[in-house]
Image (cartoon, rainbow, N blue to C red):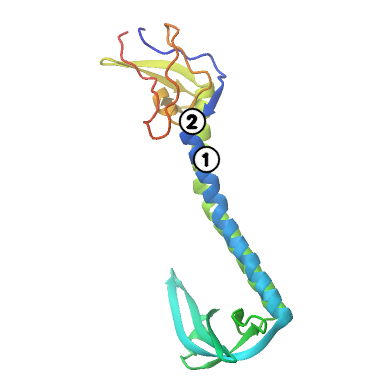
Amino acid sequence: MSGALSLPPPPRNVRFTRRARGWLTAVVLILVAPPAALAVAGLAERAALRRLLAEGRRAEARVVEVRSYATGSSANCYVDYELSVGSASWRRSGFVTPEVLARTRVGDRVPVTYLAADPGVSRLGVVDEARVVRESRSWFLGAGALGLGLAPGLLVVVWWLLGRRALLRDGVETVETGPGTTNVILHDLRRTGRSAPLAAIERTARLVNGPRSPDGSTPPPESAPGSGSGPTRASSGSS
């Protein structure tokens, strides 16, 4: 068949393309970065609460705003307060339950715990050991839940990329001809019905040395990012 490409017999030596490696890197970053950022924020909050527990002073602050944001079937409720120490004041915000929000009004006095050495560090209410443990657990459970929520969809991408690479490595080659074209198709005999055109597979995986056409020539090297979709193994010819 003139112009048809011939692949070496499986298993072949294959690797991911630059595009696929970029996708894998993005998957790892998306899966790891948000939960890691939440965990780091949780560590910072725990450190602040520990310091307030050890060094904090109690005072009363004035409520300057109450607000809530709906999130599905629940609501996130906050009280903004102003703490005055000496001639300076600091405005901060604290999370409260809907029940506390319903009975809190602007101008009310509320208890806060603050650092005498740095009054800008304060928390609404009393800081005790139980609160430190409870809020630290909430941060880390949230980070874990976020990671588990992201994992399924992202792992599907990894599974698809690995499947394309396995198809190029172990797939059986067939050739389909059409009006003026010849297409190479790879079939994975271990998974019934799993097949894909070689040209499509090579967007994510390619042979390390590249297949050779019957005349002994080697296809062009992988194109640089941004210069196109890369080489294709579909060629014009006649059978």
Identity of the residue drawn at 61% across and 78% down = 121
Identity of the residue drawn at 51% across and 32% down = 163
Can you say whether 150 is above or below 110 in the image?
above
Q: Secondary structure at mark 2?
A: loop
Closer to the camera in the image, 193 or 84: 84
Can you say whether 134 is above or below 33 in the image?
below
Closer to the camera in the image, 54 or 180: 54
CA–CA distance between discs 1 and 2? Answer: 11 Å
Q: Position of residue 125 (x, y in %)?
A: 61, 85
Looking at the image, the residue that sits furthest to the left is 179
Question: Which quarter of the figure has residue 52?
Answer: bottom right
Q: Position of residue 178 (x, y in %)?
A: 29, 17
Instruction: Say which quadrant the C terminus sits in.
Output: top left
Closer to the camera in the image, 19 or 70: 19
Closer to the camera in the image, 116 or 33: 116
Question: Which quarter of the figure has residue 146?
Answer: bottom right
* Residue 20 in view, yes or no: yes
Q: Earlier in the sequence, mark 1 or mark 2?
A: 2
Residue 24's label in the rendered image is 1
Residue occupied by mark 2:
17
Amino acid type, label 1:
Leu
Identity of the residue drawn at 63% across and 72% down = 135
